[in-house]
Image (cartoon, helix red, strand yellow):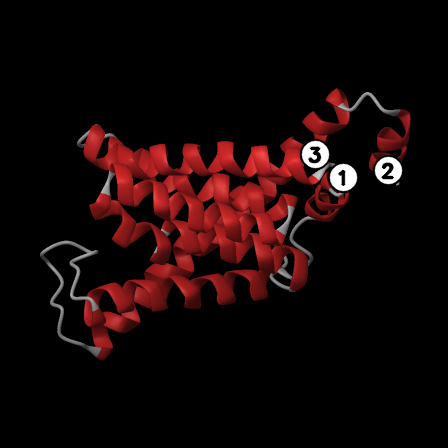
């Protein structure tokens, strides 16, 4: 694995493909993915135990929306937050600073920074900042009762290591998703012009 390589050429091609979609079609997709993200984020409360393994995947719908269009990714991020306020207010504290910010960070940096290491570092800083904000500013026990809400350089260091590894896993997973998604879209695209764009 080359840390300085481009993460995925497929993400740019997918972004280019979705430019052919109308505004209303993008809006519908953003709404659908926002609802899906809210449901996934809420599973920790709806399905105690296994739900905590499912809820991190709330990152994926936000990531997909951001690859479709950065403005729509931001809209999906905000809409998911608003939906969580209605259905799971407790999760509305967690989502914007953890799973949501990871999806948004990877999506935006995949289209702008492009390099794997830049994407991981930027996203890990966002995630660390989000966790520290919840833990030390809001005093929300996002890491559970084992972590004090009093600032500690040692704990912040561990938070960054966790954030880096977590972001790295999601970056590699997103690379796999982009490749599979690209192949799927190439198969279902019926318009010859779109097929030609996929081959270029």
Would residue 191 be found to the left or right of residue 7 on screen? right
Would residue 93 be found to the left or right of residue 74 on screen? left
Sequence-first tag of 1 and 2: 1
Residue 186 lies, in percent from the top left, at: 76, 27
Residue named by callout 1: 17
Please name which of the two marks, 3 or 1, marks the residue nearer to the observer: 1
Label 1 crowd (10 A; few <14 / some 14-19 / many >=20): some
Instruction: Name the secondary structure under disc 1.
Output: helix
Q: Can the viewer see residue 141 in this picture?
A: yes
Instruction: Name the secondary structure under disc 2.
Output: helix
Residue named by callout 3: 182
Residue 20 lies, in percent from the top left, at: 78, 38
Sequence-first tag of 2 and 3: 3
Residue that appears at 54% across and 39% down: 30
Residue that appears at 68% across and 40% down: 23
Label 3 crowd (10 A; few <14 / some 14-19 / many >=20): some
Residue named by callout 2: 197
Q: Nearer the viewer, residue 84 or 63?
A: 84
């Amino acid at each position: 694995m080359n840390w300085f390589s481009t993460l995925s050429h497929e993400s740019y091609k997918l972004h280019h493909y979705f430019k052919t979609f109308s505004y209303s079609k993008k809006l519908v997709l953003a709404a659908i993915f926002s609802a899906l993200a809210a449901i996934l984020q809420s599973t920790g409360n709806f399905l105690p135990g296994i739900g905590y393994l499912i809820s991190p995947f709330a990152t994926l719908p936000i990531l997909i929306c951001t690859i479709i269009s950065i403005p729509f990714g931001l809209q999906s991020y905000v809409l998911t937050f608003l939906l969580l306020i209605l259905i799971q207010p407790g999760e509305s504290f967690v989502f914007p600073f953890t799973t949501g910010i990871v999806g948004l960070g990877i999506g935006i940096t995949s289209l702008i920074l492009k390099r794997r290491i830049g994407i991981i570092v930027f996203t890990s800083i966002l995630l660390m900042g989000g966790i520290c904000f919840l833990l030390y500013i809001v005093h929300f026990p996002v890491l559970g009762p084992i972590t004090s809400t009093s600032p500690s350089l040692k704990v912040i260091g561990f938070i960054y290591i966790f954030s880096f590894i977590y972001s790295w896993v999601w970056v590699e997973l997103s690379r796999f998703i982009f490749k599979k998604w690209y192949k799927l879209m190439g198969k279902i695209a019926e318009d010859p012009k779109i097929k030609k764009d996929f081959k270029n």
